[in-house]
Image (spheres, rainbow, N blue to C red):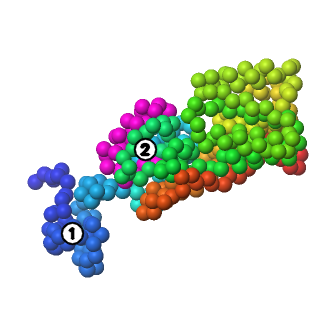
């Protein structure tokens, strides 16, 4: 007799365990039964290789234990780390993560929202650049790092305090002529507060500073052109730079070194994000570290909470981490 390739059913489990189909259903749905029956059902299911179809069961109960996480991409270390932390936090709560990426395209963002709504997810966590998103009000929704509507909670690091902290650390390290470099989206977001906090600290402490922001479409080349215009035979008028992200800081450091400006000897640099290189302990640069695990955990807690009165914006504290591009990274030198 050839072995059947047919997947086992609940009826097969009931027959194997010698119990009723109703008892099997109760065990698989977490309804209390006697230990003797539960043990028999679990043993039979294991022997037959039966697996509960959680998704189908969820559809019947109008709950799938699945949360959609929508991000611009997972190639950028910040987004990749956020996806990983969201997956971990959801798994601890017994939920699965459905991941979608949008490549920063507002139309693709809406398509992703429409898709996950059709797939009956229990909630959505997103980093979005589309303030006009149409989301079913019945689906719990949390935005990370970009506040659009007061009725949609936003979880972010304290970008303003981070900007202040960067300026303060550069000043403490002896820098007197500071520069902010950033690449900005036309859609305003919490990250814009980084340069605002930086500027406020400099003005309050009478520190010479320059703000150099360019738009996404101008990109790194526009900043490199600005830097090149200010490099004169290796001399550079700024001795401290705060970059809007660690990735930008790494690009700026490479460009300056190629043009004869030493880091941190000639200019000290601080980035923002605090993403370790390859997940190790070392950073790309000295940095303002975002509490990514706490941000993901907070977003999940809000999403799964029955309390609908979450604040419109939750800002979590940041910390400074020396990473080799400021003089305090070498205290004994």
Where in the figure is residue 288, as x and y percent of width and height? 70, 46
In this rendering, would 180 be left or right of 172?
Answer: left
In the image, residue 79 lies at what x, y percent? 54, 42
Residue position for label 1: 24
Q: Which quarter of the picture shows residue 15?
A: bottom left
Q: Nearer the viewer, residue 132 or 210?
A: 132
Residue 97 appears at what percent x and percent y? 42, 50
* Residue sitting at x 26%, y 70%: 27
Residue sitting at 64 percent across and 39 percent down?
192
Q: Is residue 130 above or below residue 58?
A: above
Q: Residue 298, percent across and down?
A: 53, 57
Dot 2: element: strand
21 and 208: which one is in front? 208
Q: Which residues are magenta?
A: 102-125
Q: Is residue 23 magenta?
A: no
Examine the rendering and report whether any part of residue 181 can be seen.
yes
Left/right of residue 124 with respect to residue 194 in the rendered view: left
The residue that mark 2 highlights is 99
Residue at the image position 71 percent from the left and 52 percent from the top: 319
4 vs 316, left or right, is left
Of the pair 332 and 245, the residue shown nearer to us: 245
Above or below, 234 against 55 in this view is: above
> What is the CA distance from the residue labelled 1 to the residue labelled 2?
33 Å
Residue 116 in magenta? yes
Screen quadrant of the N terminus:
bottom left
Q: Secondary structure at mark 1?
A: helix
Q: Which mark is residue 85?
A: none
Q: Earlier in the sequence, mark 1 or mark 2?
A: 1
């Amino acid at each position: 007799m050839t072995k059947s390739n047919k997947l086992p059913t609940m009826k097969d489990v009931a027959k194997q365990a010698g119990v009723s189909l109703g008892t099997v259903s109760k065990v698989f749905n977490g309804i209390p039964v006697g230990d003797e029956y539960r043990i028999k059902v679990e043993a039979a299911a294991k022997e037959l290789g039966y697996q509960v179809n959680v998704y189908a069961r969820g559809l019947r109960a109008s709950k799938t234990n699945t949360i959609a996480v929508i991000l611009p991409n997972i190639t950028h270390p910040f987004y990749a780390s956020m996806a990983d932390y969201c997956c971990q936090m959801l798994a601890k709560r017994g939920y699965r993560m459905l991941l979608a990426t949008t490549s920063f395209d507002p139309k693709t963002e809406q398509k992703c929202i429409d898709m996950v709504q059709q797939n009956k997810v229990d909630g959505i966590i997103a980093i979005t650049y589309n303030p006009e998103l149409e989301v079913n009000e019945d689906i719990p929704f949390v935005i990370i790092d970009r506040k659009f509507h007061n009725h949609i909670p936003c979880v972010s690091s304290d970008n303003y305090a981070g900007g202040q902290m960067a300026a303060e650390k550069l000043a403490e390290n002896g820098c007197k002529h500071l520069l902010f470099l950033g690449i900005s989206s036309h859609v305003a977001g919490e990250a814009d507060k980084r340069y605002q906090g930086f500027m406020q600290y400099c003005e309050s402490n009478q520190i010479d500073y320059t703000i150099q922001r360019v738009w996404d479409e101008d990109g790194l080349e526009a900043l490199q052109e600005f830097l090149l215009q200010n490099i004169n035979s290796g001399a550079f008028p700024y001795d401290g730079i705060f970059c809007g992200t660690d990735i930008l800081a790494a690009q700026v450091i490479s460009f300056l070194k190629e043009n004869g400006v030493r880091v941190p000897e000639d200019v000290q640099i601080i980035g923002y994000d605090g993403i370790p290189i390859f997940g190790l302990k070392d950073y790309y640069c000295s940095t303002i570290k975002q509490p990514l695990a706490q941000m993901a955990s907070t977003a999940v807690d809000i999403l799964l909470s029955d309390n609908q009165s979450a604040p419109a914006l939750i800002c979590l504290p940041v910390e400074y981490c020396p990473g080799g591009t400021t003089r305090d990274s070498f205290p004994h030198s």
